[in-house]
Image (spheres, helix red, strand yellow):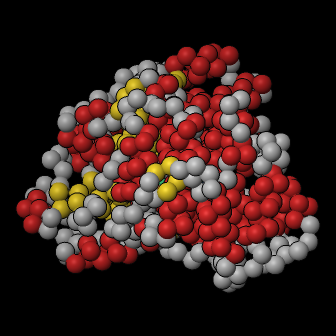
Amino acid sequence: MKLADNYMTEREAFTMMGIEVPTFDQVDLVKTAKVTPTWVHFGGGNLFRGFHSEVAQELVAAGELPAGVIVAETYDDAVIQDVYRRFDNRHLNVTMKADGSLKRELIASVSGSYTFNRDHKADWQTMMNIFAKSSLQLATFSITEKGYNLRQPDGYFTNQVLADLATDPHTTVPGNNMVATAALLLHRFETSATPIAMVSTDNFSQNGDRLRETMQTIAKMWKTNGFVGADFMTWLNQDVTFPLSMIDRITPNPAASVAEALQAIGFADTELIRTPKGTNVAPFANTEEVHYLVIEDNFPNGRPDFTKAGVFLTDRATVNDADAMKVTTSLNPLHTALAIFGSLLNYDSIAEEMKNVDLLKLIQNIGYVEGLPVVTDPGIISPKQFIDEVINKRLPNPYIPDTPQRIATDTSQKLSIRFGETIKAYVADEHRDVNDLVFIPLTLAAWVRYLMAVDDNGQQMALSPDPLLATLLPKVAPLHLGYAGNLHDVVVDILQDEQIFGVDLYEVGLGVRVENDLAQLLSGEGAVACTLHNALAAYGRYDVAEGVVSYG
Ligand SMILES: NC(=O)c1ccc[n+]([C@@H]2O[C@H](COP(=O)([O-])OP(=O)(O)OC[C@H]3O[C@@H](n4cnc5c(N)ncnc54)[C@H](O)[C@@H]3O)[C@@H](O)[C@H]2O)c1
Ligand SMILES: O=P(O)(O)OC[C@@H](O)[C@@H](O)[C@H](O)[C@H](O)CO
């Protein structure tokens, strides 16, 4: 069987293979979406395919979303061509359960897919038409942290953004994806002027606020340059909402092991694709069973009843707390620590890393000891239960084919949220001492050590993509194993960069500690494993069997 087979008429054949098929006809969604679109999603990568599209499928089945969801790609044209249109906008979502069994579901909730950038004029116009429709209630985003950037590392607008902001959006098509998004909102204002919710579901704190600020920055510049009036600003401020969200579902890149399992049952569409822009996709997505989506309930033009698909809708403060819990202490910092140390120690599986007692203790100390105490309980999810589930069930699940290399992607964009927020909380609390942080600074030092692109055996190591590599690699170029020169002079520029860490590490009193850790980490072959082991012996406060104990 394959994705393009008619699941309405061949339902039994799919079911016999253990593939669940939709109860609705995708053709109906497509027809409805042409007239009354409801939901657009930007960034049709793996998270969307493993999570949002499944939420949409449940909502369609519940009669809550007759128009399905429309996918728009601003960045990677090949995604639309290779895994959406080529497969009639369908994919297989494979949920990998802790007992090794697979749930396979044919997803047909996508009612259209478009490449929204200036190279695709017809798709551009279609998206403009969709945004003009008063039926459109929301747009969601999963475009990675860097997808929201207007500025280059030095804080100035990128040349593309400068060019976009200097030209009238009514006459010139913008090149930057955020400016293009603002152009959609401008078109909406100038046509239906109906309210809309723009929902970022990317992994960073106050994600909605960042999207709002980005849209407002663009609008202000347009106004300054005389391209829009004050009325557009007023509409943007009053009628467009940017709800906060917390999203959680470990969704690794499509894995060969899952492709093989699908081939074994006779499913044909299993090709693993790496697009020229580096997105790893396939006709299927593979994801975990556990998932949380918490969204601020602020939809000014109405919304489907997301709760029918297990989504939490709540107030802003609760979402913020849930997000801070996940992104700054209880999941993503642990992931990033495993990504950095795992890459240096030559692991290619997160589950395998969890069998290394030192790596396990590392994340226990970062999570339970250093992060959890400064987290506010969101009330809807217990932080302690959440982190227990992450460390004891989710990360060790051998059936989740996740890799430290995937998670190490774009680390420079993530450190300020993953660790910087905890550092700031310690600094802000007069009852806490930032010098009690041991394993967070060690992980930051390990990231600088990682940038040397040499593993713990002294062998060259491929680095995961990161937009700052071009500026960072020349800075660490003098470093080598056994380096005995002036380390401070080499790393000071990096460690004081607030854009990267969220704080100037020297200003908060952690710079020298990170330098000292780095000196140990690069002292020779095996020094990464050894430094971690010694730090745990000296300062580890979490005992695997007994829970938190005092400093050694
Ligand atoms: N995969 C997960 O486990 C997971 C879980 C929770 C949250 N997230 C969030 O979702 C994001 C996407 O994850 P994914 O697994 O879908 O990744 P992916 O690599 O499968 O897809 C990335 C998507 O972002 C788009 N993109 C990349 N760079 C862009 C840019 N500069 N501008 C605009 N769009 C850009 C790509 O075209 C693609 O659609 C993550 O960065 C994270 O913030 C991921
Ligand atoms: O997606 P990123 O790049 O922000 O971070 C990598 C992983 O930590 C992340 O994708 C997790 O798998 C996810 O946050 C789990 O919900």
The answer to whether residue 163 is visible is no
Q: Is residue 105 above or below residue 463?
A: above
Which residue is at a point 52% across and 60% down the rendered structure image?
A: 361
Residue at image position (44%, 23%) is: 315
Q: Look at the image and tell me whether residue 216 can be seen.
A: yes
Residue 226, located in which quarter of the rendered image?
A: top right
Residue located 50% across and 62% down the image: 360
The quadrant holding residue 417 is top right
Give the left or right position of residue 350, taking residue 91 as reference. right
Q: Please provide percent x and percent y for residue 276.
A: 56, 69
- Quick one: 177 or 490, which is closer to the camera? 490
Q: In the picture shown, does residue 228 fall above or below 174?
A: above
Q: Looking at this view, is 50 or 403 the one in front? A: 403
* Quadrant in which the C terminus is drawn: bottom right
Instruction: Give the quadrant of the N terminus.
Output: bottom left
Q: Among all residues in the image, which is located at the extreme left?
A: 12
Tally the numbered discs: 0
Seen in the picture, residue 132 relative to 22 is either above or below; the reply is above
- x, y percent for residue 357: 49, 68
Which of 427/479 is in front?
427
**Residue 546 in picture, x, y percent from top left:** 44, 54
In-image side of 377 versus 157 (left or right): left
Is 302 on the left or on the right of 423, as rendered? Answer: left
Q: Is residue 90 left or right of residue 228?
A: left
Question: Residue at point 83% right, 47% down?
Answer: 506
Dividing the picture into quarters, in which one does residue 119 lie? bottom right
Percent coordinates x, y for residue 294 in the rendering: 41, 35
In terms of depth relative to the viewer, which is nearer, 406 or 195?
A: 406
